[in-house]
Image (cartoon, rainbow, N blue to C red):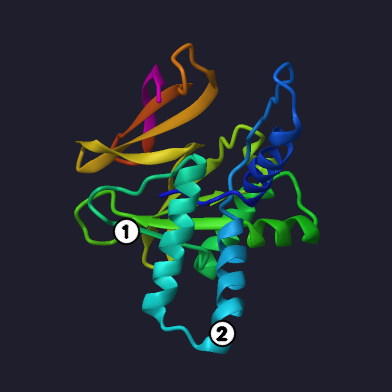
Amino acid sequence: MDHPALERAHTISAVLKVEPSMTSEQNIVVSLSGRGDEDVNTVGSALANHYSQSRIRTSKMIGMARTVCLFCVFLGVPAITGLSNGKVKPSTNIPSRLMRVLLVELCSNGCSEEEKQNWRENVYCELLHLNNDDVPEYFVSIRHPDWCGAGSNCTVWVYQRRGRAFRLLASEKGLRPHKTYTKGYRDLYGDVKIGASQARGKFEYSRSVYKFNGRKYAHYSEKYVQR
């Protein structure tokens, strides 16, 4: 399921307040963009602080989280869906060694200490299984406008752990595991939003597929999809 974006929620709330005072000849144009991954911790902290006095049990907090999620669905907030096999573990706790490796990649042309701290605060890591060795791979991204842009096309770095080292397998926009396999590894695909589709309520994406060549992932095909 997706993360709610607080800014979009405020926008919709403002529209609902303004609309009753408008005439039939007036229109409202609302542009919703951006992702709310960074808002998850904000919402979680707000709920935890709000209910800390009452010592609400974990089960009740989960129930409240579900209510918040249902409200987001009602508002039509888009979603990032997890894999059907359940092997998804979102986390902001990236291994310190991997964070250092990522900073080398991000700062190949130089970074200030302020920029490095900004990347650390906006890193997002998922543990996803790409092969059958029971050791998950690391899908790492920086969820920040400086990297993702208005279209939320975030670059995803896929790392494989080898002992104490991390090997980069792929680095492209919006990488997710596919259902098909090549050379024992799940194929990857990345959807990059192009714009609104002629079909109502849908968007056009450029979908690239990547296959494992025995050493790393290489581009295999590209097509346009609507969803």
Q: Is residue 20 magenta?
A: no
Q: Is residue 223 magenta?
A: yes
- Res. 151 image quadrant: top right
* Structural crowding at the residue carrying mark 2, measured as other residues with C-alpha within 10 Å and reported as few (<14), some (14–19) or many (≥20): few
Label 2, secondary structure: give it: helix
What residue lies at 26% left-to-right and 56% top-to-bottom? 86
For residue 101, which quarter of the picture? bottom right
Q: CA distance from mark 1 to mark 2?
A: 35 Å
Pick whichever, 125 or 63, lies toward us.
63
Q: Quadrant of residue 132?
A: bottom left
Which residue is at 51% across, 65% downward?
A: 94
1 or 2: mark nearer the eye: 2
Q: Which residues are magenta?
A: 218-227
Left or right relative to 127: residue 172: right
Quarter the C terminus occupies: top left
Please say if 197 is above or below 84.
above
Residue occupying image coordinates x 29% and y 53%: 129
Q: Mark 1 is on which residue type?
A: Pro
Q: Which mark is residue 136?
A: 1
- Residue assigned mark 2: 52
Instruction: Name the residue: 59% across, 49% down.
Output: 5
Residue 163 numbered tag: none
Question: How far across and down, in percent of the image, does residue 204 sit?
Answer: 47, 20
Q: Position of residue 114 (x, y in %)?
A: 79, 59
Amino acid type, residue under disc 2 in the picture: Ser
Image position of 61 with respect to 106: above or below? below
Q: Considering depth in this image, is 215 or 38 the residue closer to the camera?
A: 38
Q: Is residue 20 left or right of residue 137?
A: right
